[in-house]
Image: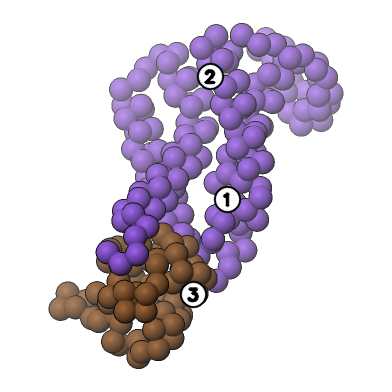
Amino acid sequence: MSNKLLLPNRYKKIGWFLLIPATILGIILMTTQYEGLSLEATTFAIYNDEVLGKTQFFSFIHTNITNTVTGILFITGGLLVGFSKEKTEDEFIANLRQSSLLWSVFVNYVLLLAAFAFIYGTAFFNVMVYNMFTVLIIFIARFNYMLYRNSKLVPNEKYN
Amino acid sequence: MKNTIKIERAINNLTQEELANKVSVSRQTINAMEANKYVPSTVLALKIAKVFNKPVEQIFILEETD
């Protein structure tokens, strides 16, 4: 019973190595209003429009890429962690993964709905930033919690 | 659906881990089936019955609500 969309188990470890530093970077950025760290570089942009500036297509631009790097690290790490096989990948684990995915999309939109209804002004900009990552975060958290809960349900006894 | 996996394991002197290895699934899967939290696929049910050398209906039993 193989799932073709999943990566081999070893990618999970690589994922955590990307996800944890990216999370720390992300928290630093969030608490400093995205100005705590600055990494300037020339990078390729398919589309770029600056506030009160010109619009550019397919050009090299010099800009602050801290958010870009953090976001890319976080999403790559999150995808590797969330979509790699477990050590023993079987039908029950696949079932847990699917139900966690369903649960996370649902919970994410319930939270977003609440944010839409009750958060106004510039704070809503933060909601949009968080919302780019919450599906992945909730999915990884839920899936790992379900795995943990199912391994703790009964201790590894002989005949209980 | 209920099952007698736990009883059969005791008769055959197998741990959850050993049974899991025999049918190549994770220990969590055996655990979840014994707790009636997971209904296995037909393939897995047949594999388990084969390990215990019994017909599948003797290990997996339908309930009124099924």
Tell me the element at label 3: loop
Specify whether B58 is left or right of A1. left
For chain B, the rendered hue is: brown
Residue type (three-letter) at the residue carrying disc 2:
Ile
Coordinates of residue B17 in the picture (x, y in percent) = 45, 64
Residue matched to label 2: A27
Q: Nearer the viewer, mark 3 or mark 1?
A: 3
A13 shown above or below A5: above
Coordinates of residue A156 in the picture (x, y in percent) = 37, 57
Q: CA distance from mark 2 to mark 1?
A: 24 Å
Residue that appears at 44% across and 24% down: A127
Residue matched to label 3: B23
A6 shown above or below B40: above
Coordinates of residue A115 in the picture (x, y in percent) = 35, 27
Q: Nearer the viewer, mark 3 or mark 2?
A: 3
Residue type (three-letter) at the residue carrying disc 3:
Val
Q: CA distance from mark 3 to mark 1?
A: 24 Å
Q: Do tag 3 and tag 1 residues touch (Cβ < 8 Å)?
A: no
Coordinates of residue B61 in the picture (x, y in percent) = 25, 81
